Amino acid sequence: MRTLVSPLALASTKGKVLYWTFFTLVVIAFALAFLFPVYWMVTGAAKPADELTQTPPTLFPEHWQFSNYTDAWDQMDLPTHLWNTVVQAFGAWALQIVFC
């Protein structure tokens, strides 16, 4: 139920257009606020080190370097960390099932 906009205001065509325009702009703003950090993280991970540290930062990578993902996978021993996460999540789930 809408509490901020009266049904009388929405009865007119102008009120509907104004309401839906404002609603759409708010939804788009929230979507950008939540999705931009994910975009920044993915593109930042695909940038070479010199481009990552340059000022001002680039919005789009000039040179895509997807080998950063494989380098991180190899150097940081990510499979072990992922397995530890699975073990902890399963353990927490199992303890919740048993004790709750």
Image (cartoon, grey):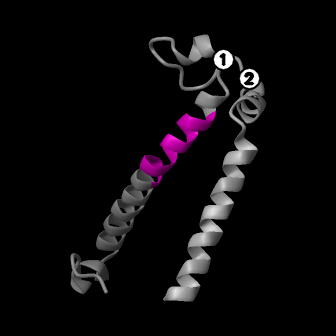
Nearest the eye: 83 or 29 = 83
Q: Is residue 84 above or below residue 12?
A: above
Query: Which residue is label 1 attached to?
Result: 48
> Which is nearer the N-term, disc 2 or disc 1?
1
Residue 18, relative to residue 58: is it above or below? below
The residue shown at (38%, 61%) is 21
Look at the image and tell me in which quarter the N terminus lies.
Answer: bottom left
Q: Is residue 38 magenta?
A: yes
Magenta stretch: give its range.
31-42
- Which residue, given by chain and number where applicable, does mark 2 sit on? 65
The secondary structure that most of the magenta stretch takes on is helix
The residue that appears at 57% across and 40% down in the rendered structure is: 39
Q: Amino acid at mark 2?
A: Gln
Place of residue 15 in the rendered image (x, y in percent of width and height, measured from the top left): 29, 72
Between residue 72 and residue 17, name the one nearer to us.
72
Q: Amino acid at mark 1?
A: Pro
Task: Determine the secondary structure under disc 2.
Answer: loop
